[in-house]
Amino acid sequence: MEPRFEKYFLKRAALERWEVEADSLEGIHRMVVIPALAESERLFKALSDLKEQSGDLLGETLILCVVNNRTADHASPESIQDNRKTLELLRGWKGSKLRIGIVDASSHGKELGANEGVGTARKIGLDLGSKVLLDHGLSQAPLISLDADCRIPSNYLSEISQFFAEEERWAATVECFHPLDGSESMANLRGILAYETHLRYHELGLRRAGSPYAFPTIGSTIVCTAEAYVVSGGMRKRRAAEDFYFLQELAKTGRVDFITDTWVTPSTRSSDRVPFGTGRSMGAFLGEEKKFYRTYHPESYEILRKWLITVTKDPDLGSQGLMKQAKELSSE
């Protein structure tokens, strides 16, 4: 491994208590990392979708499942029991068409900390996955972030692999569509339509403003090379918004592209696992359905556009000059 990569694993990686449980780590050319907390009913649907991918690609892909919970005094007994079931079922899948890797961040002594959550779980998997790839000299191999409650089409791995086969790829987000097939209740459907419209509206507003961060920030859509992951400082240990901050770092260190010929379908379920995000927003909407779903005023993106022009056209303006320009753009 190159010294610049070794420095990350010595100082910033989450490797102290966890390891990859797999039949073999030889011949791996890409990683799919899936954090799972009490997901015994949903995870295996995602794995079934992965089984439908090209057989040649599956033989070179490790599906790394990070089964996680906090310590017993900060996690429900039901979640811990469900995770035990998940670990048992996953071990039964070893030797199947899928190359399954397991990270036990659930059993006693291996749990997450009291204030840790999906960000730490995702980081554990991505740290371990990137190390496997870099140990084998595969700095340009893709690290694929997915969630246990997602569904994917049969071209998912092939499109991602084809995209990252081109030189100088760094990172990308995969297209994302929440399910609108009528399988959800009408209230749930209205909620997810409002939420996804808000997300797409915000992304388009940022693009119009010329923001370098105009991309969706959904953890299950992020893909980057092993090199990009380490150079960007790795995933953040946050209970929410870990994807937002990580994507910002990817954009600062390289280019974040868009993969549009395949997609991810996340769940629309409500959840209180994280302080904000899809699950929390759905819960808030369903709890007060009649409340108008608010989003950002269009003028805010116009102000942002003018501000970005201001700060980039004259880098020597100084703080006082910038404050003066800011007041001229918006008095509020």
Image: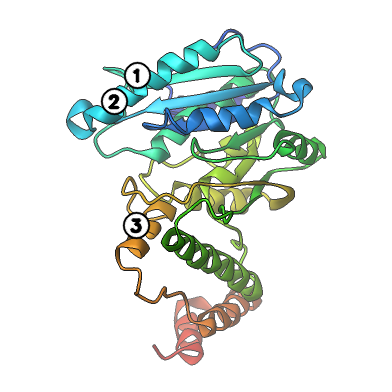
Residue 8 visible somewhere in the drawing: no
Identify which residue is drawn at 48% across, 81% down.
297
| Distance in Å between CA atoms under marks 2 and 1 | 6 Å
Which residue, as the protein is rendered here, is positioned at the far right? 166
Q: Is residue 155 left or right of residue 82?
A: right
Do callouts 3 and 1 mark residues in contact (Cβ within 8 Å)? no
User: In the rendered image of this protein, does residue 5 appear above or below residue 276?
Assistant: above
- State the residue at coordinates (70%, 22%): 58
Residue 241: assigned label: none
Instruction: Say which residue label 2 marks.
Output: 80
Q: Are marks 2 and 1 in contact (CB under 8 Å)?
A: yes
**For mark 1, what is the residue?**
84
- Whole-percent x, y for residue 88 in the image: 42, 14
Identify the image quadrant of residue 27.
Answer: top right
Vertical side of 269 occupied by 206: above or below? below
Q: Tell me which numbered mark, 2 or 3, is placed earlier along the sequence.
A: 2
Tell me where residue 10 appears, x and y as whole percent: 46, 25
The residue tagged 3 is 283
Position of the N terminus, as image quadrant, is top right
Q: Residue at x 36, y 31 (%)?
A: 38
* Neighbourhood count class around disc 2 (C-alpha, 10 Å): few under 14, some 14–19, many 20 upward: many
Task: Categorize mark 3 by other alpha carbons within 10 Å: few (<14), some (14-19), many (20+).
Answer: some
Label 1 is placed on what type of residue?
Answer: Arg
